[in-house]
Image (tube, helix red, strand yellow):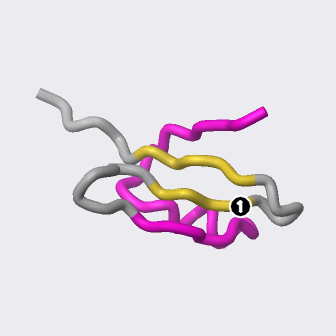
C-alpha cells in the first residue's frame, strides 16, 4: 500500500519533526516530497493547492 498525504503547511516540516525521513524534494517535474516513516515505508506529501 502506498499513502499520499495532503499537507496543510507548504513544507513537510511537521512530518519530519514527527520522525519521517526526507527522501526526495520536489523538482521541476514533480511538486511533492517523498518521505519515509520511521519503519521505512515510503509516502508522498503534497503541498496545499493554491486557492483562487
Quick check: 22 above or below 41? below
Look at the image and say whether residue 12 sits in the magenta stretch.
yes
8 in magenta:
yes
Quarter of the image where one finds residue 52: top left
Q: Which residue appears farthest toward the right when viewing the image?
A: 39
Residue 8 in percent (x, y) is at 44, 44
| Picture residue at 21% right of the left edge, 37% below the top | 50
Q: Where are the magenta residues, as a range?
A: 1-25
Provide residue 23's location: percent of width, then percent of height. Answer: 59, 69
Residue 32 percent coordinates (x, y): 42, 51
Give the residue furthest to the left.
52
Task: Name the residue at 70% across, 66% down.
Answer: 20
Q: Residue furthest front?
A: 29
Q: Say which residue appears at 50% left-offset and 38% top-offset.
A: 6
Residue in the picture at 83% in, 65% down: 38
Give coordinates of residue 9: x percent, y percent: 41, 53
Label 1, on which residue? 36
Q: Is residue 40 left or right of residue 25?
A: right
Under circle 1, the secondary element is strand
Q: In this view of the protein, which residue sits in the foreground, 34 or 5?
A: 34
Quadrant into which the N terminus falls? top right
Horizontally, is 1 left or right of 29 in the view? right
Q: What is the total number of numbered labels drawn onto the structure image? A: 1
User: In the rendered view, would you say 45 is above or below 49?
Assistant: below
Could you tell whether 12 is left or right of 1 in the image? left
Number of residues whose C-alpha sits closer than 10 Å to that of mark 1, classed few (under 14), some (14–19) or many (20 or more): some
Amino acid at each position: 500500500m502506498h499513502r499520499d498525504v495532503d499537507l496543510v503547511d507548504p513544507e513537510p516540516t511537521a512530518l519530519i519533526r514527527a520522525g519521517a525521513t526526507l527522501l526526495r524534494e520536489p523538482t521541476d517535474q514533480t511538486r511533492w516530497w517523498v518521505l519515509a516513516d520511521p519503519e521505512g515505508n515510503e509516502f508522498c506529501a503534497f503541498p496545499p493547492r493554491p486557492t483562487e
